[in-house]
Image (cartoon, rainbow, N blue to C red):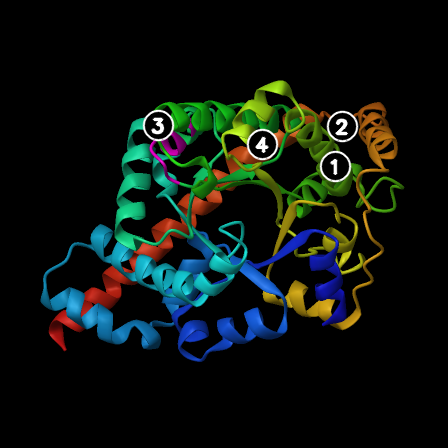
Amino acid sequence: MSALADLSAAGVAVWLDDLSRERLRSGNLAELVRDRSVVGVTTNPSIFQAALSDGAAYDDQVADLALRGTDVAEAVRMLTTYDVRWACDVLREVHDRTDGVDGRVSIEVDPRVAHDPERTVAEAKALWWLVDRPNLFIKIPATLAGLPAITRVLAQGISVNVTLIFSLARYDAVMDAYLDGMEQAKANGHDLSRLGSVASFFVSRVDSAIDGLLGEGHELRGQAGIANARLAYQHYEAVFTSDRWKALEAAGARPQRPLWASTGVKDPAYDDTQYVVELVAPGTVNTMPEKTLEAVADHGVVRGDTVTGAYAEAQQVLDALKAAGIDYDEVVEQLEVEGVSKFEASWDELVASVTEQLAKAAVA
């Protein structure tokens, strides 16, 4: 528990990367907020698919949706936004206490529209309206098509969690889209102090991809993900000290915080807390699956800021990977393609599960 408190004291917001109706009903989420320093929640199609595959907690709502003849796409929205609205309410006290910085809950647009900015914006507006809570984040993938959608959604006064960021170049584009959106939001008369955003930079998936190319026993295994994220924070510092940013800050805007995602360790040879304790820096968010959260609480060692003094070392890692024949740009591009594809597959599984549950409820 002290390690999670130490993280918070070091400026890292501890978020849970999971949500389910059962977690809400049992009071578990409220317990994690109370006892484990959790101040936010992220979700994605995979999380919802896993939650809804155990239909018992959702039976009553599914039965009502079946009686109303609700189509499956709308049923998915109703089921998922119900959970997210409830989680927003659980975290509302945190949101109010932190003046809107934390206490946030994220819900993702349908990943099948990730390459269609018009539909992404429309979906974001619909989810914002359905959940109807000020501490909501709408998750939008950082695809090329997602960048203008990010700007347009922020411009309408909707808070955004930008997800599936793997490359430094794309992260730069995401921050630019954020600044564009905030400038437009200001011009549209929105209160910038109420708008929030995080940029979700994925970590462990980078190691998994590059380790597979390096092969067993290579000295660079397990170093790419942390190095990449540390350099992302360097980019963040440059943008959020610029004159362009200072003009927005003077108007009440808050920085788009870097969020470390994909922090569960996939290789059992690695320290199961490394994607947390090696990425401690002020003004960041770390969203963890519960297994990682509990590992940090149990044996994590927080050594203070482990990022801002490590930029040169991080660059050396990427330079060494290039010398070893690893094409960084190719790897991160493929990770984005795979990330969208995985979320699409999980969404399809979610739709199939809800379709089956609606059919069963209709004949019950």
Asked if disc 2 and disc 4 are in contact, CB closer than 8 Å, the reply is no
Residue 254 figure quarter: top right
Q: CA distance from mark 2 to mark 4?
A: 13 Å
Residue 287 in percent (x, y) is at: 60, 54
Check disc 3 and give the amino acid type: Pro
* Res. 189 visible in picture: yes
Question: In the figure, is residue 30 to the left or right of 172?
Answer: left
Secondary structure under the numbered disc 1 in the rendered image: helix
Amino acid found under the numbered disc labelled 2: Ile
The magenta-colored residue range is: 151-158
For residue 326, which numbered disc appears in the image? 2
Name the residue type under label 1.
Leu
For disc 1, the marked residue is 213
Q: What is the C-alpha distance between the residues marked 3 and 1?
A: 33 Å
Number of disc labels = 4
Residue 228 is situated, as x and y percent measured from the top left of the image, at 73, 35
Q: Is residue 152 magenta?
A: yes
Marks 3 and 4, Cα distance to the nearest angstrom? Answer: 21 Å
- Camera-nearest residue between 274 and 178: 178
Which secondary structure lies at badge 2?
Answer: loop
Q: Earlier in the sequence, mark 3 or mark 4?
A: 3
Going 35% across and 54% down the picture, which residue do you hit?
Answer: 133
- Where 25 falls versus 209 (above or below)? below
* Residue 63: percent from left, percent from top: 18, 72
Q: Residues within 10 Å of mark 3 (few under 14, many from 20)?
A: many
The residue shown at (37%, 23%) is: 187
Residue at the extreme front: 250
For the stretch drawn in magenta, the main secondary structure is helix
Where is mark 4, residue-wise?
334
